[in-house]
Every structure is written in structure tokens, then in C-alpha cells.
């Protein structure tokens, strides 16, 4: 099996721009153009192109969930009834403490990242997961630490 790579997806200038915005997401287009030593219009055109192609999806603030009172992060492998994925996902989406859900291969059908304020609160959140119609089994693990947080820097740096 071969993997095709489109070299026009990102170039070095795109990578430099995205790295700059990763480090300082509040920079203006003008400041980005100054730091990258390119025209303001070039930066704006690159941002527009990256947005149109779905590479750049937004500028959400980075939040520390522990500082917000959610000191526990847990992952749950969720097995669901055949043909009920949409219903289960809608049910999981209704649980505020569910941060993300991935459809997976292997033992479980969905991998859920969730947060809680305490062990007792995690029990409540887990009970809510189990009560979602179509969920057959939940197996969870508490994250003790995050030695490598979500990152994109190495992917961008390889383009430089």
C-alpha cells in the first residue's frame, strides 16, 4: 500500500505562519507579516487558503481544565450496539464533561476523553456514559499525567 502525499498541502511559509500562530495565537495579520518578513496581503491570502482547505479550523483559546476545577482526565473505551453509533454519539455529546470522542478499531467502538472534578464526580460522569442508550460496555482509565500534550509542532517543523 502506498501513501500519496500532496506537496502543495503546506509549504515552509505556511509552516512558519502556523508555528507563529501556535505560539502566539493573538497576533494580528500585520504583526505576522512583520515577523515573517512578507507582505500583509500574503499572510492574509495564506490564512484564507488554509481556512478554505480545512487545515486551519479556528483560533480557540488554550484552557487549563485543572485550573477550571476539572482535575481528573479519564479515557473510556465504549462498546456500542450495532447500528446505534449516531444515537450514542448524540447521547455522549449531551454530557458536558465529554471533551472528545473518536471512532476506533479494536476492542471498543469509541474512545472518549472526559474530565471530572473528583473521583466521585468521575463516577457520576461514567454512570452518565453507561446510561446512554446503545452503550453496552464502558472501560475507563484515569490519566495520571500528560507527558506529551496535544501537539502539531513536529509536523510543521519537518516542513521547514
Image: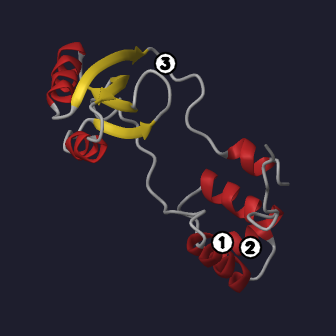
- Indicate whether 132 appears above or below 71: below
As measured in the structure, the alpha-carbon distance from the residue carrying label 3 to the one carrying label 1 is: 35 Å
Q: Quadrant of residue 25?
A: bottom right
What separation in Å lies between label 3 and label 2 (alpha carbons)? 38 Å
Mark 2, residue position: 34
Query: Which residue is denoted by mark 1 in the rendering?
Result: 31
> Would you say residue 98 is visible in this rendering?
yes
Tell which of 96 and 7 is nearer to you.
Answer: 7
**With 140 as the anchor, is 52 left or right in this view?**
right
Circle 3 residue: 145
- Judging from the image, what secondary structure is the residue with disc 2 in? helix
Q: Residue at x 20, y 26 (%)?
A: 125
Q: Is residue 74 visible?
A: no
Q: Are marks 2 and 1 in contact (CB under 8 Å)?
A: yes
Q: Quadrant of the C terminus?
A: bottom right
- Picture coordinates of residue 115, whole percent (x, y): 31, 29
Amino acid at each position: 500500500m502506498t501513501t500519496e502525499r500532496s506537496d502543495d498541502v503546506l509549504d515552509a511559509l505556511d509552516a512558519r505562519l502556523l508555528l507563529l500562530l501556535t505560539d502566539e495565537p493573538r497576533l494580528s495579520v500585520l504583526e505576522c507579516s512583520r515577523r515573517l518578513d512578507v507582505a500583509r496581503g500574503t499572510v492574509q491570502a495564506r490564512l484564507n487558503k488554509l481556512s478554505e482547505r480545512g487545515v486551519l479550523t479556528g483560533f480557540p483559546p488554550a484552557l487549563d481544565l485543572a485550573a477550571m476545577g476539572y482535575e481528573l482526565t479519564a479515557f473510556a473505551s465504549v462498546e456500542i450496539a450495532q447500528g446505534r453509533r449516531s444515537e450514542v454519539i448524540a447521547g455522549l455529546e449531551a454530557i458536558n464533561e465529554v471533551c472528545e470522542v473518536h471512532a476506533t478499531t479494536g476492542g471498543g467502538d469509541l474512545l472518549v476523553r472526559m474530565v471530572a472534578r473528583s473521583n466521585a464526580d468521575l463516577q457520576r460522569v461514567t454512570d452518565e456514559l453507561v446510561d446512554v442508550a446503545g452503550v453496552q460496555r464502558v472501560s475507563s482509565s484515569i490519566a495520571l499525567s500528560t507527558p506529551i500534550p496535544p501537539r502539531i509542532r513536529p509536523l510543521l517543523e519537518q516542513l521547514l
